[in-house]
Amino acid sequence: MHIDVDKCIGCGLCIPYCPVGAISLENNKAHIDYDKCLECGTCGRTRVVRCPKGAIIEEESVYQWPRSIRKYFSDPMAYHPETRVPGRGTEEVKTNDVTGRVRKGMVGIAVEMGRPCLGTTFTDVEKVTKALVEAGVTKFEKDNPLTYLMVEPEKGTFSDEAKQARVVSCIIEFTIPANSLGKTLTTLKKVAREIETVFSLDLISRCEEEEDGIEVPVTRQLEAMGFTVRPNAKINLGLGRPLKEV
Ligand code: SF4
Ligand code: SF4
């Protein structure tokens, strides 16, 4: 984002809206720290920040590589060119009845890097993806823009240029056989101590009919590992779906 200093009157109205404190006043003009700015677009939204002089401007260069990494992963209004999905750029499991991403016997995992509220670099993302590969994850979700950024997806690595990028959040997404859940979670717990940010973890599992009723099969395993489980149903009632056998 860019400030037109000829228009800015230094009122300071825009400053509290920046989630990363990138805007300050210098010589009675707003100034954006280019390194801190994640290109989330908030300060430039006229319905949010009513800059009295229209001095906050988004330049075309934010859509050019490598600045575009910040833009696409930080601005919820920006559509990733690879997946045509805004925000973090993936439909996750919300469309599982159509895509069949998570099938019987599998567990889907989404590692929401930088959430809550901290942001992440791709250097930290790579630490997590490489650890997962070492723990046996063989394939990251193909319809996720983060996977497109990898130079060697089978190794979970990113280019040096990408690793310089800092973004609000991105999602590492993959599936594993249900019986390797323990190993994967142990790996994630370990690597969580080696990164300079936080992540939230989503586990996606089908409900199965057991003797004593419907249950989420991984629940008991998670509780045995000391996790508190908070089930959250994502149900698509579907008009005759599922289209895919999942
Ligand atoms: S709201 Fe507009 S005029 Fe006020 S400090 Fe920010 S850029 Fe300048
Ligand atoms: S685009 Fe977002 S991160 Fe950048 S200065 Fe504006 S509010 Fe802050």
Image (cartoon, helix red, strand yellow):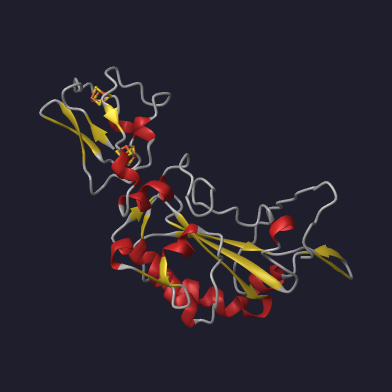
Q: Is residue 140 above or below residue 60?
A: below
Looking at the image, which residue is at 77% across and 61% down? 244
Q: Is residue 18 above or below residue 130?
A: above
Task: Specify the farthest residue to the right.
Answer: 211
Residue 94 place in picture, x, y as percent: 66, 52
Residue 49 place in picture, x, y as percent: 36, 25
Left or right? Give the position of 121 relative to 192.
left
- Within the image, what quadrant is residue 166 found in? bottom left
Q: Is residue 221 above or below residue 87?
A: below
Left or right? Give the position of 212 relative to 200.
right
Looking at the image, which residue is at 45% across and 71% down? 129
- Within the image, what quadrant is residue 31 found in? top left
Left or right? Give the position of 39 relative to 6.
right
Task: Specify the farthest residue to the left.
Answer: 27
Looking at the image, which residue is at 49% across and 46% down? 87
Residue 21 place in picture, x, y as percent: 28, 41
The C terminus, quarter of image: bottom right
Looking at the image, which residue is at 45% across and 53% down? 115
